[in-house]
Structure formats: C-alpha cells, structure tokens
Amino acid sequence: MNDRRENEEFADSTWIEGRNAVLEALRSGKTIDKLYVLDGCKDGPVQTIVREARKQDTVISFVARERLDRLSQTGHHQGVVAQAAAYAYGTVEEMLERAREKGEPPFLILLDGIEDPHNLGAIIRTANLAGAHGVIIPRRRAAGLTAAVARASAGAVNYTPVAKVPNLCAVMEQLKKEGLWFVCADMHGDVLYDLNLTGPIGMVIGSEGEGIGRLVRESCDMAASIPMKGDIDSLNASVAAGVLAYEIVRQRRNLTL
C-alpha cells in the first residue's frame, strides 16, 4: 500500500485502540475489519484479544511499534489497534433472499483483490443502479466498508448489501448449487456481447494490478473480454464492472421485451 493510500485509509477508517476498548468491541459483535497487534507481545490481555479475534476469524496483523504509533490517535494503544467497519456487512443468504422477494434471478458481483476504496465504492454504486442483489468481497486483500467507500458509493452502501467472506472460491461453489453461473472480466476471454449472460449470475471483477486470482478464475464458467480500441490495454476495475454489469442488464431487459 503506498503512503498516499495508507494515509487516506487511516483518515477514513474508524479506529479503536486500547486493550479494554478493543476487547469490548470484539465481544459486543462489532465488525472488525483488521486487528493490529504489537509483534512479539505476550501480555495476557493482548493474548486474550488475539484469541477472541481468531474465534471471529478477524484478520490479524502483527506489526512493529512504529506502525502502531502511526495508527494511534491517542498515543495510548497498549499494543492493540482495531480497524472497525463504518457500516455493517450483509450475508450471501440475504442477497439470495432479496432476489427471491423481487422475483428475479440472482445477480451478484464478486470482487477479487479490490483494495482501492474509491473503486469499491464506485462498484457498489454501479451494483445498486444495475439492480444487483449484492456485492461479495474477500476477508483478506480487500478494502472494507470505510467512510471513503461510503462516499464513493454515493450512499449506495446503505441499500446494497456487501458480504465479506473467508474464501471466494468456496462461496462460488455454494452459489453454483443455487443455480448461479459465473462470468469474470478477463482480457483473454470471449467478447462479452457474444456470451449469454442471462439467468442467475455472478459477475467477478479482479484488481487492476493482478487481475483475478488463478483459483477464482478457474471457478468461473465464462470469461468476458471488453473490446478495446485505444492505445492502452485495460480499463479501471470500476469502469470494467460497469460495462459488464450493464451488458447483463441489457440482456435481461431483452428477455422481458
């Protein structure tokens, strides 16, 4: 993470520091995106916090004191700082229920490695406008629901559920049993206009830098490429998500005409 993005994330996140405050937050059920712990600290209270975080499958990062000092706003972190989500996460089951209530085939957007909060917010905004029933992100290597994400979503985070899951591939296998097919954005795939993107579908978008991970790519049923006419070879992740999402919208609309 570069310094600019790190500073922006720190400024836009909700931080909890101090042993008692962090432990109470965990035990109260507050969503913690990431726990930072002083590397090598063996104090009993800190180890209790680590055990509680592991029970909740919270991402834990053991860091040097200098990193904790930068994160701390009070200067009294006591060896632990927690990054709390600004908004509550939804569940995949809630997304499927939304689709059933609307009488629509499920349309979900899965993001693999989107770490830029502006991209995540923009994709949530697109998901809402395109009628997607939810957005699924991995627990690791992904931006969480910070205030910056909420702003970039233009408020869509209040209406479109976002689920954070331990493993995208496992969720995809679960959703295949619910009848979903998966299409990923991939520059080496078939032209998106030639694919059948109707019916229950999960749309997978990777990061600009590394794209979609190999295992997630192998779990997809189709790969869609977006025709490029310019001098560069890729679109911003949120723009690619918009193009592919609205081709799904177009094909669904044509079925009802």
Image (cartoon, rainbow, N blue to C red):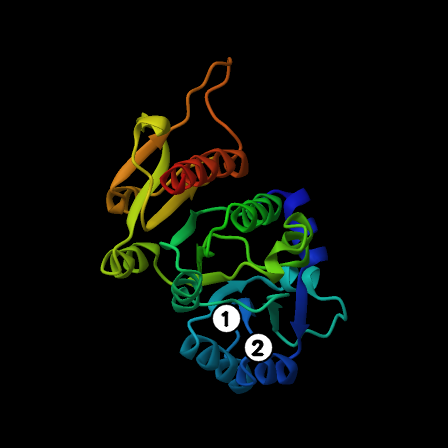
Three-letter residue code for mark 1: Gly
At horizontal 53% and vertical 39% (from top left) the residue drawn is 238
Q: Which mark is residue 40?
A: 1
Residue 66's place in the image compared with 233, above or below, is below
| Screen quadrant of the N terminus | top right
140 in relation to 28, above or below: above
At 55% from the left and 45% from the top, the residue drawn is: 126
Number of numbered discs present?
2
Specify whether 75 is left or right of 213.
right
Write the residue at 42% across / 72% down.
57
Residue 38, can we see it? Answer: no
Residue mark closest to the camera, 2 vs 1: 2
Residue 113 at x, y percent in the picture = 45, 47
149 and 255: which one is in front?
255
Image position of 187 with respect to 211: above or below: above
Query: Where's residue 5, x and y in %?
Result: 64, 45
In this image, 95 relative to 191: left or right?
A: right
User: What label does residue 30 carry, if any?
Assistant: 2
Q: CA distance from mark 2 to mark 1?
A: 26 Å
Look at label 2 and name its amino acid: Lys
First-in-chain label (2 vs 1)? 2
Q: Secondary structure at mark 2?
A: loop
Q: Is residue 230 visible?
A: yes
Residue 203's image quarter? top left
